[in-house]
């Protein structure tokens, strides 16, 4: 069973599912896509989605109760929009890291321009014992232009997540090309759906895994869809994922 660590199906809190009925349909779709474990990651984004962890946990508990009959294990995290004060806000308890040990935090960067000093900002977070996970870098314009611009972050041991719909081409050829290049370079630690609703932003896990399995082999597909996501939840060290032709990346 696959493990999905990035989606916006928690209802009524961001640009994802609007109502709990849509959440439940989304979870049913996830089960059909062979997803057995799912972590909701609602946006926490000052000025746009100023969600508070306490409120998110209340909504999560209601969803867990409503979804109790579905064969899927549910967790709660968050997707945080990067700012220079990321580490300081984390110290205040403003975010929800992923997993039992709260070791990993999903971080989204600006789509158009690489933030100045981002490596230093993420390093300050790591000094607090929290590892930032870079969300969907293949969809950033500067990464599409030059995927190797992420090598500094990879060398700093920042794991990265690619979106299933980027792998399948549903987000367009530029995102797909960047996703495959990042996978070729061995920079990606796991895949996730970034699903928002079952109608227009679904899971497509099966197809993404099939594509990865065909191009990179079963071991890589399992690392990306099962083994490393499980390690995130357990708070364990992530395993390096070989790139094209077994290429070893800077993330080791």
Image: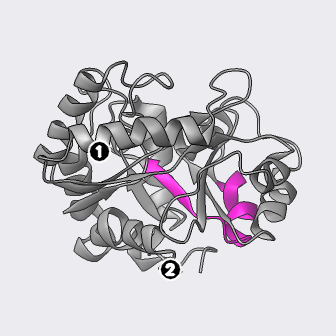
Residue occupying the point 36% across, 65% down? 224
Q: Would you say 167 lies left or right of 104 here?
A: left
Let me know if residue 99 appears in the view.
Answer: yes
Q: Would you say 236 lies left or right of 227 here?
A: right
Residue occupying the point 27% across, 39% down? 203
Secondary structure at numbered mark 1 = helix
Residue designated by label 1: 64
Q: Would you say 218 lies left or right of 136 here?
A: left
Above or below residue 152? Residue 141 is above
Residue occupying the point 52% across, 59% down? 98
Percent coordinates x, y for residue 68 in the rendering: 18, 47
Figure quadrant of residue 22: top left
Residue occupying the point 37% across, 43% down? 61
Find residue 232 and name its label.
Answer: none
Find residue 236 and name its label.
Answer: 2
Q: Which residues are magenta?
A: 148-162
Confirm whether the magenta stretch covers residue 64: no
Report the quarter where the C terminus lies: bottom right
Marks 2 and 1 in Cβ contact (< 8 Å)? no
CA distance for labels 2 and 1: 25 Å
Figure quadrant of residue 51: top right
């Amino acid at each position: 069973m696959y493990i999905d660590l990035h989606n916006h199906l928690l209802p009524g809190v961001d640009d994802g599912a609007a109502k709990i009925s849509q959440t439940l349909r989304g979870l049913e779709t996830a089960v059909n896509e062979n997803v057995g474990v799912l972590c909701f990651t609602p946006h926490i984004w000052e000025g746009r989605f100023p969600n508070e962890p306490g409120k998110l946990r209340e909504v999560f508990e209601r969803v867990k109760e409503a979804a109790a009959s579905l064969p899927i294990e549910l967790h709660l995290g968050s997707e945080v929009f990067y700012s220079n004060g990321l580490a300081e806000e984390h110290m205040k308890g403003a975010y929800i890291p992923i997993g039992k040990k709260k070791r990993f935090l999903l971080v989204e960067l600006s789509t158009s321009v690489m933030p100045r000093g981002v490596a230093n900002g993420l390093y300050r977070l790591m000094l607090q014992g929290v590892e930032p996970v870079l969300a969907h870098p293949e969809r950033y314009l500067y990464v599409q232009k030059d995927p190797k611009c992420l090598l500094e972050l990879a060398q700093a041991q920042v794991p990265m997540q690619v979106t299933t719909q980027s792998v399948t081409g549903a987000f367009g050829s530029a995102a797909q090309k960047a996703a495959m290049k990042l996978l070729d370079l061995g920079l990606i630690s796991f895949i996730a759906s970034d699903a928002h609703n079952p109608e227009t932003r679904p899971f497509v896990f099966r197809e993404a895994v099939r594509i990865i399995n065909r191009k990179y082999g079963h071991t890589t597909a399992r690392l990306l869809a099962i083994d490393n996501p499980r390690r995130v939840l357990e708070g364990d060290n992530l395993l390096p994922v070989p790139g094209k032709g077994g290429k070893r990346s800077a993330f080791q």
